[in-house]
Image (spheres, rainbow, N blue to C red):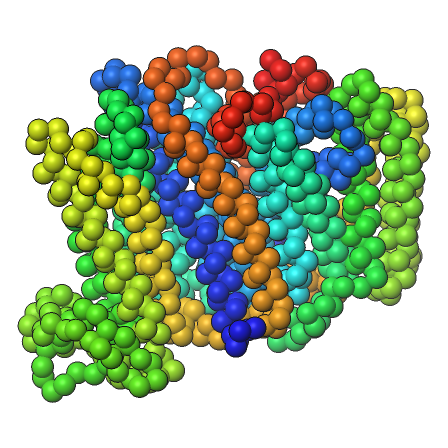
């Protein structure tokens, strides 16, 4: 036929997951930053900066899960089986975060702190276990006879735990720069102050993950450091350093929009780095997207619906963000 | 844990999460159609009580929809986390069907739901009505896909098995498998009835407290017309569904009937009550009516119904459970028919709105539809055992093989989190119900829409009521 369906689906799912990481990243980040802001009024503002969009952001996670099931059932079964505990804990964290988010708005003042705590706890749990799952994914899974052959706690390694902590830092930075963009006054100043150390923390953990990954996985090291690959992939780390430098300057000079955009660029670069390391495997370390693909009848059948509906969802998402552009202030809540 | 095997725990976990989930979509399906009818009547008659009822129920609809989305997030992952061997074996068929369900739901959320919940005074009445109708149709399309997937697991066709895995060869045959039309009709009707009884109970509750107004009377009246007309239709569909099951899954029917063996040429009796004992291979303490089983299931007085002993013990479903879940479902259905008839009788002389014993019964019947849905699903799903895909894969071969400790731990977490969070959600819904419909609601412009704090992406934002009674010091959202 000439159409590489597994490749198309890999791109769709990778795109969906990136949309999820970017978009749910900043609103999980707001939950992570909640403990740093004590003032109730400012907490309200923080919530209001994501209120119109957070639920839509989670859409991509459901879509990613279902599409993985349909397009790469082998990957869906092996990866979800292997990551059973971290994924269940992540989902429970997300449920907690979601319900707490809604009911905080509806709770009486005296009980609001309970929903605050649920919001913080849910955000931290979801982020940490997402990072752990990512780390375990990079580490790869032992597959025998098309099923996961490892142990129940294979996912729990120093590397995966570090990835969990690293993701907390990354999402906190996304949330922080999002708030710089969406707020003003004292809250924005607080975020500017918090931004500087956060950039250093994120730079540090990114550096450690970037070195730890090839160090622990010779095949990934081979991918990056052999010639001429090194030459081709060099722009990624170089751009990471450039972005970080620009980001630091932007935070120091109290810029409004550039910190968030540069953080997005950083996340995107990290994501591409991950793609370079793992390509073309959907189940690291050795099962490729073609080996794990559902038959073309299934992938083709799904593609019809996806090509029709995904652009619609994207347009709608873009419109939502467009309508919601601009700063959110304390007064906004009292109209 | 408690002597349960890992497989039992995996099944209980899935049953628990999906039982919680199914309640929300079922009410969503029913309320969406109810809202479409209300809005249609408002546009046709210009009677404001239909408009007031529309606004009242659309808030409850929104909260319910939100709960369905949150509990559904877990379902998208449970097939892989708990049933990885099944996902690999049958993912090429069930995965795309699930994807279509998700895509439909998001398509809805992205488009018509926004207009429906927040566009009352922003778009013309025609376009608004169109959106409500599209939401109602959309929920049915979602039902279509998910039931196609489920029905295929009961009566699979349109596939080949290559390298030990299912490969779809004919999507039309896959989707329109033999049990699908019956299951779809039965479930959609069940959703309508469950909603009608929920609505009727709400009205009866208000009437019993002396809150009597035309809108509340209209709620009760509409619910009871549904009970009168649709509950018998549902019994008829259920009968057809049963005949279909007899043809394709006879062992399930034998288990439902607690029917162990046929004696000579005697027609099969109907066991009304009893205790099917899987060990002793008999139904103890049974009360039976001769030949009625044959009459109901074969529509004849001489043909026999398959018996459990016709199947090897390892191919039998747990008759003790499905015998009773089936009877609970049927009892609910008969009660619904009875309520419909009694209600119609009471319409003479307007006693319907004042007869307290009837109103009390209507309140108690509020959850009957949901109970019937759960009991019915337990019957069909447990009745399919020991198969996960009938005749193709056994449930025991389908699981991910997590340890009992691990599954027990996550099950406890699920139970705690679900009861706390969805308990709060359901409590909030009931709170909205207690408020009752407001007169002349919806005259003012309600702000909201994509990118606004009140948005279809967060359906719960459609309801502004606080979580508790008392002064309204709830948080104002940006608007």
State whether residue A119 appears in this view. no
Task: Please say if B126 is above or below A116.
Answer: above
Between residue B255 and residue A43, name the one nearer to us: A43
Q: Is residue B170 left or right of residue A71?
A: left
Q: Residue at x 64, y 38 (%)?
A: A115
For this orientation, the residue located farthest to the left is B301
Q: Which residue is drawn at 13% across and 42% down?
A: B342
Q: Residue at x 26, y 24 (%)?
A: B212
Q: Which residue is drawn at 43% across and 44% down?
A: B24
Q: Position of residue B35 (x, y in %)?
A: 33, 30
Task: Please say if A177 is above or below A135.
Answer: above
Q: Is residue B161 left or right of residue B306?
A: right
Quadrant housing the N terminus of chain B: bottom right
Quadrant housing the C terminus of chain B: top right
Q: Where is residue B130 in the image (x, y as percent from the top left)?
A: 35, 26
Q: Where is residue A23 in the image (x, y as percent from the top left)?
A: 68, 37
Q: Position of residue A124 (x, y in %)?
A: 73, 46
Between residue B392 and residue B267, name the one nearer to us: B267
| Residue B308 falls in image quadrant | bottom left
């Amino acid at each position: 036929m000439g159409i590489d369906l597994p490749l198309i689906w890999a791109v769709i799912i990778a795109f969906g997951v990136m949309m999820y990481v970017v978009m749910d990243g900043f609103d999980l980040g707001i939950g992570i930053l909640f403990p740093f802001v004590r003032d109730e009024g400012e907490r309200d503002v923080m919530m209001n900066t994501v209120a119109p969009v957070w639920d839509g952001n989670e859409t991509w996670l459901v879509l990613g899960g279902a599409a993985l099931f349909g397009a790469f059932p082998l990957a869906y079964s092996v990866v979800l089986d292997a990551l059973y505990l971290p994924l269940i804990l992540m989902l429970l964290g997300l449920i907690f975060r979601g319900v707490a988010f809604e009911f905080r708005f509806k709770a009486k003042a005296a009980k609001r702190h309970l929903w605050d705590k649920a919001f913080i706890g849910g955000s931290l749990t979801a982020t940490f276990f997402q990072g752990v799952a990512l780390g375990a994914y990079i580490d790869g899974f032992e597959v025998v006879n098309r099923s996961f052959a490892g142990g129940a706690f294979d996912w729990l390694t120093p590397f995966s735990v570090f990835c969990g902590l690293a993701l907390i830092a990354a999402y906190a930075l996304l949330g922080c720069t999002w708030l710089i963009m969406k707020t003003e006054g004292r809250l924005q100043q607080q975020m500017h102050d918090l931004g500087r150390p956060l950039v250093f923390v994120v730079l540090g953990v990114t550096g450690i993950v970037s070195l730890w990954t090839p160090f622990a996985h010779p095949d990934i090291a081979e991918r990056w450091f052999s010639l001429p690959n090194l030459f081709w992939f060099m722009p990624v780390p170089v751009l990471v350093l450039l972005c970080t430098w620009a980001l630091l300057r932007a935070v120091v000079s109290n810029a409004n929009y550039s910190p968030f955009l540069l953080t997005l660029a950083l996340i995107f670069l990290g994501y591409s780095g991950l793609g370079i390391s793992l390509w073309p495997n959907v189940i690291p370390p050795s099962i490729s997207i073609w080996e794990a693909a559902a038959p073309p009848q299934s992938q083709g059948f799904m593609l019809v619906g996806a090509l029709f509906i995904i652009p619609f969802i994207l347009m709608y998402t873009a419109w939502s963000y467009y309508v919601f552009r601009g700063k959110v202030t304390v007064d906004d809540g009292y109209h | 844990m408690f002597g349960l095997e890992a497989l039992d725990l995996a099944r209980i976990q899935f049953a628990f999460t999906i039982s919680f989930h199914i309640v929300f979509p079922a009410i969503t399906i029913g309320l969406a159609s109810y809202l479409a009818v209300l809005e249609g009547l408002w546009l046709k008659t210009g009677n404001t009580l239909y408009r007031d009822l529309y606004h009242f129920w659309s808030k409850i609809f929104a909260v319910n929809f939100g709960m369905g989305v949150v509990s559904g997030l877990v379902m998208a992952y449970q097939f892989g986390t708990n049933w990885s061997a099944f996902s690999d074996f049958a993912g090429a068929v069930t995965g795309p069907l699930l994807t279509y369900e998700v895509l439909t739901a998001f398509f809805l959320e992205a488009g018509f739901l926004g207009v429906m919940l927040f566009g009352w005074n922003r778009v013309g009445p025609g376009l608004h009505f169109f959106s409500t109708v599209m939401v109602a149709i959309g929920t049915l399309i979602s039902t279509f896909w998910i039931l196609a997937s489920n029905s295929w697991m009961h009566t699979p066709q349109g596939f080949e098995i290559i390298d030990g895995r299912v490969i779809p060869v004919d999507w039309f045959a896959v989707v329109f498998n033999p049990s699908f039309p019956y299951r779809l009709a039965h479930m959609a009707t069940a959703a309508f009835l469950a909603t009608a009884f929920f609505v009727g109970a709400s009205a009866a509750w208000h009437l019993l407290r002396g809150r009597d107004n035309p809108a509340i009377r209209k709620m009760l009246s509409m619910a009871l017309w549904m009970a009168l007309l649709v509950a018998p239709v549902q019994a008829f569909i259920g009968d057809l569904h049963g005949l279909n099951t007899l043809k394709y899954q006879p062992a399930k029917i034998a288990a439902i009937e607690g029917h162990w063996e046929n004696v000579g040429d005697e027609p099969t009796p109907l066991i009304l009550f009893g205790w099917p004992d899987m060990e002793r291979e008999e139904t103890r303490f049974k009360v039976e009516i001769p030949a009625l089983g044959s009459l109901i299931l074969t529509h004849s007085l001489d043909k026999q119904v398959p018996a459990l002993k016709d199947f090897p013990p390892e191919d039998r479903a747990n008759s003790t459970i499905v015998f009773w879940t089936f009877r609970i479902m049927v009892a609910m259905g008969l009660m619904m028919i009875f309520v419909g008839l009694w209600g119609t009788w009471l319409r003479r002389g307007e006693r319907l709105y004042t007869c307290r014993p009837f109103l009390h019964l209507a309140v108690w019947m509020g959850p009957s539809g949901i109970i019937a849905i759960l009991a019915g699903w337990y019957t069909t799903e447990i009745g399919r055992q020991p198969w996960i895909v009938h005749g193709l894969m056994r449930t025991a071969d389908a699981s991910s093989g997590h340890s009992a400790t691990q599954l027990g731990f996550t099950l406890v977490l699920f139970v705690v989190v679900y009861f706390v969070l969805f308990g709060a959600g359901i409590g909030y819904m009931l709170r909205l119900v207690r408020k009752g419909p407001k007169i002349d609601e919806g005259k003012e412009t309600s702000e909201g829409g994509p990118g606004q704090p009140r948005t279809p992406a967060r359906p719960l934002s459609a309801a502004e009521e606080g979580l508790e009674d008392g002064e309204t010091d709830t948080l104002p959202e940006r608007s």
